[in-house]
Amino acid sequence: MPKIHEALKPIQWLIGTWESVTAQGSFPTIRDFSYNEVIKFESLGQPLLNYEARSKNPISGNPMHLESGFLRIKPGTNEVAFMVAHNFGLVVLEEGTASDSGLQLTSKSVDRMSFAKDPAVKAIQKTYRLNADGTLEIQTAMETSSTPLTNHLIAVYKKKD
């Protein structure tokens, strides 16, 4: 197991594999839905965490979404940047701040492949919170080319390792 970089202290609590206990999605242009998700934050000894999330349909077990990226911290600060690529053709750079029990992130750039499905995602805001019971809660708001910033996802995870 690699040594954890000193700069990661403010986000060290994220390291590990987390499995959803509850995960719900909604948006004005789609039907409400549930999903199961496993997310993983891994340290390789650098001042960043490798990240992967895989979600699936809770009834059929079919894959729904995959995203991967890097959560980087500016050494000596609580400033973070989260670069994430989504399997449906979206790439997002979010920036914000970290604390001992949370992250606040806002998209700084959002781009997509030329043949991605409309409407286009225009902005993302995320809040990560480590709850008193040890669960991780992630809330995601999204703005598209046809809908203003709106709550989209809320999920609660339990650490597996």
Image: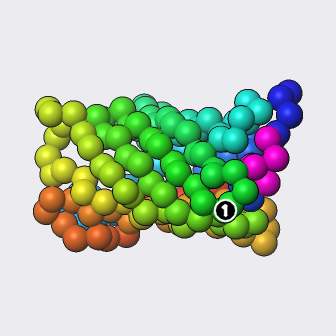
Q: Along the line of sight, which residue is nearer the eye, 65 or 120?
A: 120
Quadrant position of the C terminus in the picture? top right
Residue in the picture at 63% in, 52% down: 74
Question: In this orientation, does residue 39 appear?
Answer: no
Placement of 123 over or under 159, stated as above or below: below
- Residue at the (75%, 65%) spot, across then down: 100
x, y percent for residue 87: 36, 32
Q: Is 107 included in the stretch rendered in magenta?
A: no
Q: Secondary structure at mark 1?
A: loop
Quarter of the image for residue 134 reads bottom right
Q: Quadrant of residue 115?
A: top left
Is 13 displayed left or right of 156 in the figure? right
On the image, numbered disc 1 is attached to which residue? 78
Main SS type for the magenta part?
helix
Q: In the rendering, at what x and y percent does residue 101 appear?
A: 72, 66
Residue at 43% of width from left, 63% of height from top?
A: 106
130 lies left or right of 25: right
The reply to whether residue 110 is in sight is yes
